[in-house]
Amino acid sequence: MEYDFGNLLKIKPTAWAQESNFPAIKPIKELYDKLVNRGFKIVFLSNREQALFYPTKKNLIDQGYTTFERVIVRPVNSKKQGSAQFKEDIRTQLVNEGYTIAGCIGDQASDLAGKHTGIKIKLPNYVYNVA
């Protein structure tokens, strides 16, 4: 085995995401489909680095997430900050652009922390935790 769960990010920080072949979680995909059919605008927000934008977007599309407003990742040369603060800052920008955030879904507490989260849906993650 080239790497294991505990050392994945230390050994190959972005190799796993470059593969862009992660299957959709069926109940989340079903919720996504219902939201899209009801006219909700979907924004995918990740603290992944800019180099992972295209593999992330490709994986979403390949898994059937084809209707969305944006895929947002951490910009090149952005200031260093934790994931929770980065995501709160982006959500604040979206609200300032006129969006109303109805809810957030994520497997990390940082996905749901801060202002402008709406309904929070926390997914289990038994592999890693982002502080």
Image (tube, rainbow, N blue to C red):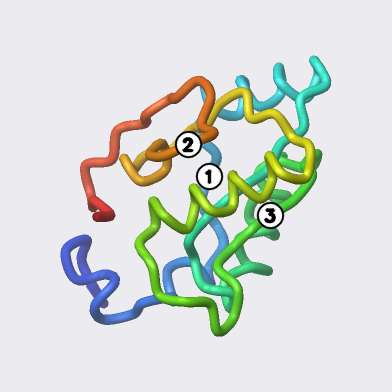
Q: Position of residue 58 (x, y in %)?
A: 69, 60
Amino acid at circle 1: Pro
Disc with the residue nearer the chain's start (3 vs 1): 1
The residue to which callout 1 is attached is: 23
User: On the rendered image, what quadrant is the N terminus found in?
Assistant: bottom left
Spatial distance from mark 1 to mark 2, Cα to Cα?
Answer: 30 Å
State the residue at coordinates (69%, 45%): 94
The number of numbered badges drawn on the structure is 3
Q: Residue 113 bears which disc, if any?
A: none
User: How far is disc 3 from disc 2 in space, using C-alphas?
Assistant: 20 Å
Circle nearer the N terminus (1, 2): 1
**Residue under the point 53% across and 44% down:** 23
Task: Say if 77 sits above or below 60 in the image.
Answer: below
Q: Position of residue 103 (x, y in %)?
A: 56, 26
* Kind of residue indicated by mark 2: Lys
Residue 71: image tag: 3
- Please name which of the two marks, 3 or 1, marks the residue nearer to the observer: 3
Compare marks 3 and 2 and give the one earlier in the sequence: 3
Instruction: Label 2, secondary structure: give it.
Output: loop
The location of residue 87, given as percent across then percent down, is 49, 51
Q: Which residue is mark 2?
A: 115
